[in-house]
Image: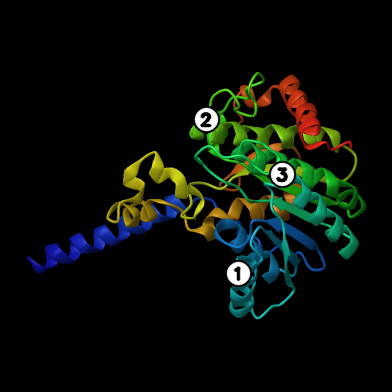
Amino acid sequence: MLLSIVIGATVAVLTYKLARLIIEGGQFRKGTRCDGKVILITGANTGIGKETARELLKRGGKVYIACRSLERGNEARSDIIAQTGLADIHVRELDLASLESVRKFAKGFLEEESRLDILINNAGVMACPKALTKDGFEQQLGVNHLGHFLLTNLLLDRLKASAPSRIVNLSSLAHKYGKINRKDLNSEHSYNQVTAYCQSKLANVMFTRELAKRLQGTGVTAYSVHPGTVDTELPRHMGSLFFLFDHKLVKPLLRVAFKTPLSGAQTTLYTALDEDLAEESGKYYADCREQKLSKYARNDELSAWLWDESVRMTKLSG
């Protein structure tokens, strides 16, 4: 009887560990350094972004974390310094829901830093109830796509001057369920919080592909990333859709099935650092491997249209 219990318990433990290995997914195991490189990460005060910042700091980078809340950003900075013993990490204010804030941040950063080697557009919101940014954009489109579109373009000359350099855009598997609504891109006539999220994540992928085309020959490469299903604050609005997400008994079970933030950061680290990707650009990755995009996401004409519309909406040329 005792032997059966021991065997059963052992099998259960091994099964759990195997399941966790599968859930955690691909890992970037190379010791690639980034000494002397200047790295900018948006939304890095928590979750995947915070883990990315910590790892890149440990690998020798000078890391900037750009957050809407300076208080939360500085708390994250203090945590990272305490854990690593390294202090070359800096917090700057950036609200991606405000084009004025994006322009102010970019101006300040360019005055402060003579180079930018890696830009990681990590910040995002997910499945939010209908809300508008300060410029009147649907929040998910505005924060996930338009804010990062403007920020990236304002920093492009510095990235080119620092080449070889990289841009990593965090997207999601959800982009495969997205459509770019040409007639109602800003969700002014109808709104569904999941549909709008999927559209914004598709926009991240299409932006990356179009950006890569425009950057050919500059030494700047761009990648889009699906981090996986990760235990972060990002799905905090999902309880308004599926009440079980907020149930006190369900939340711990969901965490068991999700990646840790550190595992969620692995594909970001892979695309930011791996030398094998130096000649690649415009592709989409998950679990540290290239993934196939949907046919819709590969629509070059629509990607060009989205770029032009994003220029108009952000007043980039003005």
60 w.r.t. 131: above or below: below
Q: Amino acid at mark 2?
A: Thr
Which of discs 1 and 3 lies nearer the camera? The answer is 3
Q: Kindly identify which residue carries mark 3.
A: 147
Q: Kindly identify which residue carries mark 1.
A: 76
Quarter of the picture containing the C terminus is: top right
Q: In the drawing, does residue 4 fall left or right of residue 80?
A: left
Secondary structure at badge 1 equals helix
Relative image position of residue 198 (x, y in whole percent): 55, 33
Secondary structure at badge 3 equals helix
213 w.r.t. 11: above or below: above
Q: Residue drawn at (75%, 20%), measured in percent from left and top?
A: 301
Relative image position of residue 128 (x, y in whole percent): 51, 41
Quarter of the figure with residue 290: top right
Residue 257 circle label = none
Q: In the drawing, does residue 265 fall left or right of residue 166?
A: left
Q: Residue drawn at (14%, 64%), measured in percent from left and top?
A: 5
Residue 195 circle label = 2
Q: Amino acid at mark 1?
A: Ala
Q: Amino acid at mark 3?
A: Gly
Disc with the residue nearer the chain's start (1 vs 2): 1
Quarter of the figure with residue 279: top right
Q: Residue drawn at (82%, 68%), measured in percent from left and top?
A: 36
Q: CA distance from mark 2 to mark 3?
A: 19 Å
Relative image position of residue 9 (x, y in whole percent): 21, 63
* Residue 4 visible: yes
Disc with the residue nearer the chain's start (1 vs 3): 1
| Front one among 254 and 139 | 139
